[in-house]
């Protein structure tokens, strides 16, 4: 199963989700990666586990726009007979994957939380209907394209340095018509929520932006990062870089503490990969209690500061 | 200016949704409605029409004949007409086959701007626009939280995992809007009454020049193999705060070796 994995980068780093998919692909067979950007050759060394990493380095690929990347991947698949192309889901990757599917007339399965070989055939698992059903999906032809839900696979611990090869970039006229006028980089403070072992998140139940201090204090005591729901980000209570959910980040920490979060599906998809979920909410019927390991019905304004004190005391004393 | 909005009829959110174990397709026999995420795209088209002064808004969809009922909601909001691609042979179309049918319909319309909503609430699919744009060889921008049209260009504020980008694409272009882009209007009574008399065309796949094996299961490259129950989560505990909740949470975290 010669597989090509799209290795998305941001700044000087290959994305953790892409490396997770690469690790899974390498465990199933021969996996190569492809990096597309400007001045990105040096990033190939981060792709341990890949047999080979293709580098498409071209000023026309500087902006994270999907269509020129479709051109790069389509050429590689055609010239090197990859039968499988895998992506870690992201805003960019979804558009590249679907464009590639149409270009190559290839089947695309999305939102996969599992990917395995069964009697030589690739089988994916896709949660459906609010994760109440797990659908096993397959492909009836090659190449097979898949988008994997982020946080599904952890990057492999290490791997040998891959062979690096350059790709000649040839772009379609319509692929370069979109132009990036302004690429935003919202700087984060504190540990990245995607890499943190502990994430403490706040939602509308906080009541107002000033209550985020409670969340920040608990996160600090636990040595974790702060996250927020889309509702409170849209309301301007907390910066977008902390948003967890469908259009924000997907996190899979060891511990996720949800404070005043109802647990709508849009939020759930961003945090359900957490090992342990603790939820504090005054509404006993909040959906978040259906997928929490410990659900606490009560007033977070009372409970969270107390918990912060208890954690501090324990850490200070042990 | 002509704006096409691609929409989908989906099962009503409140309706008990199930996948038919025989066909392995979503059971669409219950109450149906216009996909809520598509309503944002319809609203954005209507706002553009209002700000541009003159524009035609065409609703384009692939679905069974009955889907016209849901499309009429968009007409009631103010869209001018609807074009439904409906064909027995198109049932069970996956992304690939659906993008083929929509692209054929859009090719016939040749709009200046093609809008999509951010996802389908039934399949959770959020990729169709990029496949359609590829087939039409048009620029595409997704996750638009702001959209302005001027001087033959679309300017989009795009939300990604890293913040907000500003992207410009010459028309014709495909733009997928997020549900944060606007608050959709409710159809007025006058709008609802008037919707019935607006043009609602139904075309078959072959009328669009598509071969029978270009749509439906024959035109698809993915399949559903099995339906399973989700894996159980570990034991779940729920407590009411009696003043000791903070201590109980700490004990739980200690037990799980998380502090």
Image (spheres, rainbow, N blue to C red):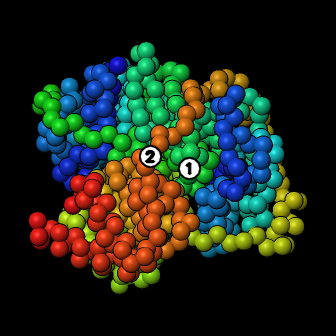
Tag shown at residue B233:
2
Give above or below for A140 relative to A253.
above
Q: Residue B188 lies in what quarter of the image?
A: bottom right
Mark 2 vs mark 1: in front:
2
Give above or below for B253 relative to A209.
above
Mark 2 Cα shell of 10 Å, populated few (<14), some (14-19), many (≥20):
few
Give above or below for B88 relative to A234.
above
Cα distance between the residues tagged 2 and 1: 15 Å
Looking at this view, is B15 or A221 the one in front?
A221
Which element carries disc 2, helix, strand or loop? loop
The spot of residue A101 in percent (x, y) is: 48, 33
Are dots 2 and 1 on a single chain? no
> Which residue is tagged 1?
A130
The spot of residue A281 in percent (x, y) is: 46, 71
Looking at this view, is A241 or A169 the one in front?
A241
> Is the C terminus of chain A in the top left, top right, bottom left or bottom right quadrant?
bottom left
Give above or below for B58 relative to A260.
above
Asked whether the viewer can see residue A16, the reply is yes
Marked residue chain, label 2? B
Mark 1 Cα shell of 10 Å, populated few (<14), some (14-19), many (≥20):
some
The spot of residue B211 in percent (x, y) is: 69, 25
Asked whether the viewer can see residue B49, the reply is no
Which element carries disc 1, helix, strand or loop? loop
Marked residue chain, label 1? A
The spot of residue A143 in percent (x, y) is: 44, 24
Q: Residue A42 lies in what quarter of the image?
A: top left
- Which residue is drawn at the image coordinates 32% and 37% (left, top)? A21
Looking at this view, is A291 or A59 the one in front?
A291
């Amino acid at each position: 199963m010669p597989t090509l994995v799209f290795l998305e980068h941001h700044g000087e780093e290959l994305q953790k989700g892409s490396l997770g998919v690469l690790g899974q692909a390498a465990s199933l067979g021969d996996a190569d990666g492809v990096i597309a950007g400007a001045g990105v050759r040096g990033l190939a060394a981060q792709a341990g586990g890949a047999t080979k990493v293709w580098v498409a380095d071209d000023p026309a690929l500087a902006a994270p726009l999907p269509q020129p990347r479709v051109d790069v991947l389509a050429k590689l698949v055609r010239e090197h007979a990859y039968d499988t192309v895998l992506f870690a889901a992201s805003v960019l990757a979804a558009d590249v994957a679907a464009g590639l599917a149409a270009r190559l007339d290839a089947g695309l399965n999305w939102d996969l939380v599992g990917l395995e070989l069964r009697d030589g055939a690739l089988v994916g698992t896709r949660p459906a209907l609010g994760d109440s059903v797990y659908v096993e999906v397959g492909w009836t032809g090659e190449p097979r394209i898949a988008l994997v839900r982020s946080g599904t696979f952890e990057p492999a611990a290490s791997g040998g340095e891959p062979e690096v090869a350059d790709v000649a970039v040839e772009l379609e006229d319509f692929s370069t018509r979109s132009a990036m006028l302004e690429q935003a980089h919202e700087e984060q403070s504190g540990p990245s929520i995607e890499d943190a072992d502990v994430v403490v998140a706040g939602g509308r139940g906080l009541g107002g932006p000033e209550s985020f201090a409670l969340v920040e204090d608990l996160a600090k005591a636990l040595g974790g990062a702060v996250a927020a729901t889309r509702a409170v980000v849209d309301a301007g209570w907390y910066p977008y870089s902390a948003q967890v959910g469908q259009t924000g980040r997907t996190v899979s920490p060891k511990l996720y503490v949800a404070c005043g979060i109802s647990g709508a599906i849009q939020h759930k998809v961003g945090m359900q990969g957490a090992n342990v979920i603790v939820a504090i909410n005054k509404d006993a019927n909040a959906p978040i209690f259906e997928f929490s390991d410990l659900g606490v019905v009560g007033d977070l304004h009372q409970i969270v500061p107390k918990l912060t004190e208890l954690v501090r005391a324990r850490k200070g004393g042990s | 200016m002509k704006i096409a909005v691609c929409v989908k009829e989906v099962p009503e959110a409140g309706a008990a949704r199930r996948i038919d174990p025989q066909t392995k397709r979503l059971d669409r026999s219950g109450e149906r409605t216009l996909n809520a995420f598509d309503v944002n795209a319809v609203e954005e088209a209507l706002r553009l029409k209002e700000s541009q002064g003159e524009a035609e808004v065409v609703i384009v969809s692939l679905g069974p004949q009955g889907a016209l009922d849901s499309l009429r909601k968009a007409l009631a909001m103010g869209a001018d007409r609807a074009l439904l691609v409906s064909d027995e042979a198109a049932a069970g179309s996956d992304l690939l086959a659906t993008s083929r049918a929509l692209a054929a319909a859009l090719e016939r319309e040749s709009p200046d701007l093609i809008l999509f909503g951010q996802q389908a609430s039934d399949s959770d699919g959020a990729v169709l626009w990029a496949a359609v744009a590829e087939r039409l060889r048009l620029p595409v921008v997704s996750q638009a939280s702001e959209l302005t049209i001027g001087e033959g260009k679309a300017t989009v504020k795009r939300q990604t995992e890293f913040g907000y980008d500003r992207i410009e694409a010459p028309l014709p272009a495909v733009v997928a809007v997020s549900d944060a882009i606007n608050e959709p209007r409710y159809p007025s009574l006058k709008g609802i009454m008037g919707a019935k008399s607006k043009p609602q065309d139904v075309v078959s796949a072959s009328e669009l020049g598509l071969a029978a094996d270009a749509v439906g299961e024959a035109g698809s490259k993915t399949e559903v193999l099995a339906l399973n129950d989700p894996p159980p989560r570990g034991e779940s505990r729920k407590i009411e705060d009696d003043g000791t909740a903070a201590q109980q949470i700490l004990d739980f975290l200690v037990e799980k070796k998380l502090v």
